[in-house]
C-alpha cells in the first residue's frame, strides 16, 4: 500500500495541488531530477531534442494482459488525464506571459483546453469516455475523488510530477519544456491508449489520438517553444531530456502498478480502511491521545499520519496483537455502549479483526514517537485541555507571512499586491486572499439584494433579462451625454480633462500601471485542473488569452502599457518585484483594483460566481465614452492611445469579451439549473452581481485620490465627475 509519507504525498498532495495550493517540497514518491542525471553534455538543437524524446518512448514496450479489464485501466489513469496540462500552470500566469516563449506556452495551454470549446477539452472528453463505460468519478475538486477506493496511491505519482513542476519558478523552464514535450509527443501510455480504443468512440478520442491535426499543431508549438528557448541563450538541453526520462520512468511505474503482484496484506487493508474514514473523524478527537499525540494530529487532513496512527494503535492497550477476541477495541470500544459503536460496519470490523490477528506475523514499521511518560488511551482526555503549538498554528494560518498568529492584520495594498503576485501557490497567502476578498464582498452585499436586482429588472434570473440589462448598459456607455446639457464638448468628446497638462496625463497613466501590467489576472485561477470540468472554462480562458496577447508579445496588454510609458521616459521595474511596489510614482490606491484581481485569482474555487460577475464588469467597462475620452486625451498630447482603443474593440458586446462574459454566466447558470434547485440558482445570481459591484468599489480609492489631487486646479465640476462618474446634468 505505501507509507504514511506516500499517503501524504500522493492523495492529499494531489488534492491540494489540483486546487492551486502548492507545498514547497517535492512529493516523496516523486524524487527530483538530480544534477548528475542532467549533466551529460551534448550539442543539441530543438529537432534533435524532439528526436531524442521520441526515442525514449520506443525504448521499452509495455503492455498489460489482454484479460485485464480496459475499464480498470481508464479509471486508474483518470488522475493524470483529468489534470492534463497542469505542468504549465505557473507558465501561463500573468507574470510569465509577456515574452515570446510565454506567449507560445499560453497557446500550447489553449490548444490543450480545447481552443475555447468545452467539448474538445481533454478532461471533458475523458469524463465522457468514463461515463460511456459506466464509470463515474467524483469531482476533481473533492476529497471524495482522491479517497476513491478504486484508485491506488501509485495512480497519483505521475500527475504529481506534473503538478510539482507546474509550480516551479521561471528558473525551472527546462523542466516545464521537458515534461510538456514528452507528454505531447508520447500521448497516453500504450496500455491506456489500447484501453481507449477498446472503449471509446471516435469523437471521444479527438484530443487524445496521435497523428491528428491537433497533434500536428501541438508538435509545431513544441518546436516553437524549444526554438524560442534556444534563442534566449544557454539552453539546458540535458536537463530537458533528464526530466523527460524521469517522466518515462513514472509512466512505466504506473503501468507496472496496474496489475498487482500480490493481494493486499492485512496491514494494507486496514490502512485503506483508515484512509476512507479519517477525514470524518477529524475534529472529534482533539483531546484524545495515542502515544502522546492527539488523534486530530494523526488525522489532520493537511498532513495526515495514518501509518503512524496504526502503529500507535497497535502498541496501545486497545489491541492485543494476534488476539482480536481479547482486544479492547473489538471487545468493548466498538460494541454497544462503547465510544466507537456504529463507526464500523460488519465488513469493516472484519478488516480490523484480521489486522489484529496478523500483527504478530507482520512487520510493523518503526517510527519516531514523542517521548511521553504515559501511553494515553482512546478514552482518556488531556488534563490540561490546551492546544499544542502545532495545533494553534494550524488554526491561525497567518503565522508564516505576517510574523505571528491571530486574525488577519491590516496590510498595505502594495505589499498585498507583491505577495499575491510573487508568492504563487503559498497556502498562507491564499488564505489571506480569501479573507481579503470576503471583506470586500461584505462591503457590496446590497448589490445582490432582491430589491436592488428587482429595481434593475434583473430579478428573478433569466438569460433574456441579463442580455437586455447588458444591452442597456452598453447603450448608456456608448450614447450617454458626456457633459452638461447633453452638449458634446469639442476635441473629440473630451470633457474638462482637456485642460490637463501632459505631465498630469502621464501621472494618471502611471497610476493605471499596477493594473494594466497584469491585465487578465482575475482569470488566471481558472488555469488549475480544478476547473477542467467547468463548461465555461474554455470560454473564460479565451478571454484570458486575449488579455495576454493571444501568443503575440506585441499584443500583450501589459507590454502595450509598458511601451506607452517607456516612450515617454517612464521605465518601471518588473511587476512581481519589490522595487515595483516601492516605485515612488505610485499612489497606494493604485493597487486597490489589481489586489482585488489577484485575490480572486487565488481562491477562484470559493468565489466562482463572484468571478463571473467581476469579469463582466471589467469587460463591460472597456466599451464606450470613457475609453473614447481617454483616447482623445492621449492623442491631444501625442501619447500612443492604442491600449484604450484596443479595449474598446475587443471588449465589444456583439462578438467580443463582453458578449463572451454574458455567455459564460448563462452557460454556468444553465448548468446549475440542471443540477440544483431554484434557491441555489437565486443565491448564485445574487453572488454574481455582488462580484459585478466589486469592480466599481475597488476603483473608488484611486478615483478619490486622483480627484482630490486634481480637483483644486480643475474645479468642483471635474472633481464631481471623478468621484461619482456622472455629470452635474445627469445627477439632476
Image: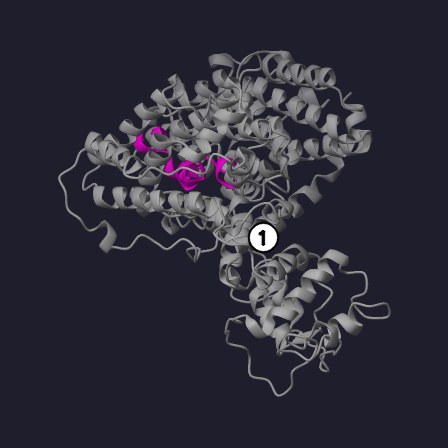
Between residues 19 and 127, which one lies in front from this camera angle? 127
At label 1, counting other C-alpha atoms closer than 10 Å, the crowd grade (few under 14, some 14-19, many 20 or more) is some
Regarding residue 429, the answer to whether it shows in the image is no
The part of the image, by quadrant, that contains residue 314 is: bottom right
Between residues 517 and 717, which one lies in front from this camera angle? 517
Q: Percent from the top left, x then y, of residue 284?
A: 74, 65
Between residues 583 and 340, which one lies in front from this camera angle? 340
Q: Is residue 189 above or below residue 35?
A: above
Q: Percent from the top left, x then y, of residue 4?
A: 53, 63
| Number of marks in picture | 1
Magenta-span inclusion, residue 81: yes
Q: Is residue 377 above or below residue 130?
A: below
- The residue depicted at 66 percent of the width and 27 percent of the height is 668
Q: Along the horizontal axis of the image, is 435 left or right of 280?
A: left
Regarding residue 216, the answer to whether it shows in the image is yes
- The residue depicted at 78 percent of the width and 73 percent of the height is 331
Q: Percent from the top left, x then y, of residue 225?
A: 29, 31
Badge 1 marks a residue whose secondary structure is helix
Q: Along the horizontal axis of the image, is 498 left or right of 280?
A: left
Magenta part of the chain: 79-105
- The residue depicted at 57 percent of the width and 69 percent of the height is 308
Q: Which residue in the protein does label 1 denote?
A: 431
Q: Along the horizontal axis of the image, is 398 left or right of 111?
A: right
Magenta-span inclusion, residue 576: no
Amino acid at each position: 500500500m505505501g507509507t504514511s509519507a506516500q499517503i501524504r504525498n500522493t492523495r492529499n498532495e494531489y488534492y491540494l495541488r489540483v486546487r492551486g495550493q502548492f507545498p514547497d517540497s517535492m512529493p516523496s514518491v516523486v524524487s527530483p531530477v538530480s544534477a548528475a542525471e542532467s549533466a551529460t553534455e551534448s550539442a543539441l538543437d530543438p529537432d534533435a531534442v524532439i528526436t531524442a524524446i521520441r526515442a525514449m518512448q520506443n525504448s521499452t514496450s509495455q503492455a498489460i494482459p489482454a484479460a485485464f479489464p480496459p475499464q480498470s485501466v481508464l479509471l486508474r489513469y483518470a488522475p493524470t488525464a483529468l489534470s492534463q496540462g497542469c505542468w504549465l500552470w505557473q507558465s501561463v500566469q500573468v507574470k510569465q506571459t509577456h515574452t515570446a516563449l510565454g506567449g507560445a506556452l499560453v497557446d500550447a495551454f489553449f490548444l490543450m483546453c480545447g481552443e475555447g470549446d468545452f467539448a474538445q477539452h481533454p478532461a471533458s472528453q475523458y469524463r465522457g469516455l468514463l461515463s460511456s463505460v459506466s464509470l463515474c468519478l467524483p469531482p476533481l475538486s473533492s476529497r471524495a475523488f482522491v479517497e476513491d477506493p478504486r484508485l491506488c496511491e501509485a495512480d497519483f505519482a505521475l500527475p504529481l510530477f506534473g503538478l510539482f513542476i507546474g509550480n516551479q519558478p521561471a528558473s525551472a523552464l527546462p523542466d516545464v519544456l521537458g515534461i510538456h514535450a514528452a507528454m505531447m509527443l508520447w500521448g497516453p501510455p500504450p496500455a491506456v491508449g489500447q484501453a481507449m480504443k477498446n472503449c471509446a468512440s471516435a469523437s471521444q478520442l479527438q484530443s487524445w489520438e496521435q497523428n491528428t491535426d491537433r497533434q500536428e499543431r501541438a508538435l509545431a508549438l513544441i518546436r516553437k517553444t524549444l526554438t524560442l528557448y534556444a534563442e534566449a541563450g544557454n539552453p539546458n538541453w540535458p536537463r530537458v531530456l533528464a526530466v523527460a526520462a524521469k517522466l518515462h520512468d513514472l509512466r512505466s511505474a504506473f503501468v507496472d502498478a496496474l496489475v498487482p503482484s500480490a493481494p493486499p496484506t492485512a496491514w494494507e487493508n486496514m490502512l485503506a480502511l483508515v484512509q476512507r474514514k479519517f477525514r470524518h473523524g477529524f475534529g472529534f478527537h482533539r483531546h484524545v491521545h495515542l502515544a502522546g499525540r492527539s488523534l486530530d494530529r494523526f488525522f489532520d487532513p493537511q498532513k495526515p499520519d495514518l501509518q503512524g496512527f496504526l502503529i500507535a494503535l497497535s502498541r496501545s492497550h486497545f489491541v492485543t496483537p494476534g488476539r482480536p477476541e481479547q482486544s479492547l477495541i473489538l471487545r468493548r470500544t466498538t460494541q454497544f455502549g462503547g465510544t466507537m459503536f456504529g463507526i464500523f460496519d460488519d465488513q469493516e470490523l472484519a478488516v480490523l479483526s484480521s489486522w489484529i490477528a496478523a500483527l504478530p506475523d507482520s512487520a510493523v514499521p518503526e517510527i519516531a514517537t514523542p517521548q511521553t511518560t504515559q501511553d494515553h488511551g482512546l478514552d482518556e482526555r488531556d488534563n490540561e485541555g490546551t492546544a499544542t503549538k502545532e495545533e494553534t498554528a494550524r488554526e491561525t494560518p497567518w503565522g508564516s507571512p505576517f510574523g505571528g498568529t491571530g486574525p488577519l492584520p491590516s496590510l498595505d495594498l502594495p505589499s498585498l499586491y507583491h505577495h499575491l503576485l510573487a508568492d504563487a501557490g503559498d497556502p498562507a497567502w491564499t488564505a489571506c486572499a480569501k479573507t481579503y476578498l470576503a471583506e470586500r464582498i461584505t462591503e457590496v452585499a446590497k448589490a445582490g439584494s432582491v430589491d436592488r436586482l428587482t429595481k434593475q429588472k434583473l430579478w428573478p434570473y433569466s438569460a433574456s433579462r441579463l442580455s437586455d440589462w447588458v444591452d442597456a448598459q452598453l447603450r448608456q456607455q456608448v450614447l450617454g451625454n458626456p457633459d452638461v446639457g447633453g452638449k458634446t464638448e469639442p476635441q473629440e468628446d473630451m470633457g474638462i480633462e482637456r485642460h490637463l497638462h501632459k505631465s498630469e496625463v502621464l501621472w494618471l497613466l502611471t497610476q493605471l500601471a499596477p493594473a494594466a501590467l497584469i491585465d487578465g489576472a482575475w482569470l488566471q485561477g481558472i488555469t488549475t485542473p480544478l476547473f477542467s470540468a467547468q463548461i465555461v472554462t474554455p470560454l473564460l480562458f479565451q478571454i484570458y488569452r486575449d488579455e495576454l496577447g493571444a501568443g503575440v508579445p506585441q499584443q500583450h496588454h501589459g507590454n502595450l502599457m509598458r511601451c506607452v510609458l517607456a516612450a515617454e521616459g517612464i521605465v518601471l521595474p518588473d511587476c512581481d518585484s519589490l522595487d515595483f511596489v516601492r516605485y515612488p510614482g505610485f499612489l497606494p490606491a493604485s493597487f486597490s483594483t489589481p489586489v482585488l484581481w489577484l485575490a480572486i485569482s487565488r481562491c477562484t474555487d470559493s468565489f466562482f460566481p463572484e468571478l463571473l460577475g467581476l469579469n463582466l464588469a471589467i469587460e463591460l467597462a472597456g466599451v464606450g465614452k470613457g475609453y473614447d475620452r481617454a483616447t482623445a486625451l492621449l492623442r491631444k498630447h501625442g501619447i500612443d492611445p492604442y491600449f484604450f482603443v484596443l479595449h474598446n474593440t475587443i471588449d465589444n458586446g456583439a462578438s467580443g469579451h463582453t458578449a463572451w462574459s454574458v455567455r459564460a454566466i448563462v452557460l454556468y447558470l444553465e448548468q446549475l439549473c440542471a443540477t440544483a434547485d431554484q434557491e441555489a440558482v437565486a443565491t448564485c445570481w445574487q453572488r454574481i452581481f455582488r462580484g459585478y459591484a466589486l469592480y466599481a468599489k475597488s476603483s473608488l480609492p484611486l478615483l478619490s485620490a486622483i480627484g482630490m489631487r486634481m480637483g483644486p486646479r480643475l474645479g468642483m465640476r471635474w472633481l464631481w465627475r471623478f468621484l461619482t462618474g456622472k455629470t452635474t446634468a445627469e445627477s439632476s
